Image (spheres, grey):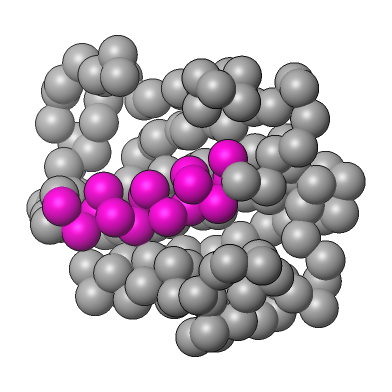
Amino acid sequence: IEFRKIRVEKKYARRIPQVLVDPEKMKIAFLNIIVNAIEAIEKSDGKIEIETEAVEGKCIVRISDNGPGIPQDQLDRLFEPFFTSKEKGTGLGLTNTQNIILSHQGSIRVQSEPGAGTRFIIAFNLHDGNAVALEASPQ
């Protein structure tokens, strides 16, 4: 991120919802999305935005970038095993990410438009439907 001079904007909810997930698996899932964003951003004013919020009993995480976006024909195949548009990709990163999120009873969807960037929207059920008062981590 620093080498490519990409800005990271964090917009964390003040009240972070408590969800029951395996933290190590979530790191893998979120890192797959973030690494893809870093690799996609080609311009010098690159930006990745990470947002969290609690909405209607769900914890929503949005990871957006201002990269070139994904063409519709590729968007439809994004989570397919072994599908990749990268020269050295395996096509397993987003498949693995989707499997991790689904195994936690979450959902993942993607919005993208060529020339306008990409946004992943991940949702998890809140634990007991309550938010826990925590300060958002500065990291």
Taking the image as shown, residue 58 lies to the left or right of residue 37, namely: left
Residue 70, image quadrant: bottom right
The correct choice, above or below, for 116 with respect to 106 in the image is above
The correct choice, above or below, for 32 with respect to 13 in the image is below
Residue 4, image quadrant: top right
Observer-nearest of 132 and 62: 62
Residue 61, given in percent of the width and then of the height, sits at 42, 44
Report the magenta stretch's main SS: helix
Taking the image as shown, residue 62 lies to the left or right of residue 58, namely: right
Q: Is residue 126 visible?
A: no
Residue farthest toward the front in the current orientation of the protein: 88
Taking the image as shown, residue 137 lies to the left or right of residue 51, namely: left
Q: Is residue 35 magenta?
A: yes
Residue 13, given in percent of the width and then of the height, sits at 36, 25
- The residue under the point 55% across, 30% down is 49
Q: Is residue 132 visible?
A: yes
- The residue under the point 66% across, 67% down is 87
Observer-nearest of 32 and 23: 32
Residue 27, given in percent of the width and then of the height, sits at 26, 48
- The residue under the point 55% across, 22% down is 3
Bounds of the magenta span? Answer: 24-38
- The residue under the point 70% across, 39% down is 41
Observer-nearest of 91 and 27: 91
Q: Is residue 117 magenta?
A: no
